[in-house]
Amino acid sequence: MTSCLTVLSVSDRFEHRVLELDWETRECLRVFEGHGGVVLSAVYSSDGQRILSASRDETCREWDRETGKCLHVYEWHYRWFCGALYSKSGQRILAYGVGAIVEWDRETGESLRIYDGYTILSASYSEDERRILSVASDNTVREWDCETGECIHVFKGHSGRVHSAKYSKDEQRVLSSSRDCTVREWSRKTGKCLRIYRNPESAIIRALYSSDGERMIFISQDRTISEWDKKSGSRIRSVPILSGINIVGCDFSDCDFQEAALKSIMRAFGGKV
């Protein structure tokens, strides 16, 4: 296994494969082939030993990172997937896309539950894996109970497509970002919108809390990463990103903000920093 910083690349030319690249040299280290349709997402497992990919061929595939061998194929016919992710424990796999969220047992491939009825653009587990947050194509965020499969909350208020939704550290609040150039903070228990953060310059692709819950990072469509103070609702600073890079995720770090922003770009593409 190489020790260099690596990133995953999918379908840059509508190819049916996943590429692992050396971040510094852009050299292709490994190719993961087997999908029969365009691959739309790929993520590393928490230990970095496996890769999970989602495709329009109505499957998700798990790969051995070192050998490139396909370990499991998770199928759900008639619906293609926008993305897939591991649960916090790594024991379950969650895939989302056209008309459904599907959950599997990672080892056995058994379908555990189907959350049906909406086109899902993104999804994530709560820390205890008892709930799921999903972003639907009807401009809403929905929370699901993993035991019953029922929708327990619907967060309505955005006037444009919602791009992401994340829990706060204590999971009492939900932060959502939207094409309507706002980020909204919601009470998880009541579904009430607590605050609206406005960024009139550009739509917000992603938003998340810092670990202490006092700050937030917004990732904008105009290729900037900005840090905001949660209490005052004001922007602290922002970092422009090099032309040609589309940011799809970000994270806080204990290092300098500028350095953190650049490292976050790497993490956004699956980089292990």
Image (cartoon, rainbow, N blue to C red):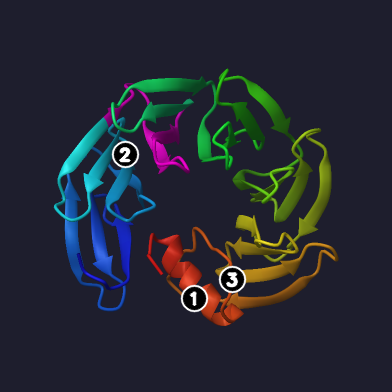
Q: Residue at x 23, y 34 (%)?
A: 72
Q: Which residue shows up at 65% across the image and 49% down it?
A: 178
Q: Which residue is mark 2?
A: 55
**Measured from the top left, where is residue 54 in percent x and y?**
34, 40
Which stretch is magenta? 74-98
Badge 1 element: helix
Q: Residues within 10 Å of mark 1 (few under 14, many from 20)?
A: some
**Residue 16 drawn in magenta:** no
Q: Quadrant of the C terminus?
A: bottom left
**What amino acid is labelled 3 in the image?**
Thr
Horizontal arrangement in the rendering, residue 231 relative to residue 30 (left or right): right
Give the mark nearest the N terminus, 2 or 3: 2
Q: Which residue is mark 3?
A: 224
Q: Check residue 262 in the rendering and tell me which mark sits there, or answer none.
A: 1
**Disc 1 residue type?**
Leu
Task: Check disc 3 and report its element: helix, strand or loop.
Answer: strand
Classify 216 as above or below 157.
Answer: below
* Mark 1 or 3: the one toward you: 1
Asked which secondary structure carries label 2, the reply is strand
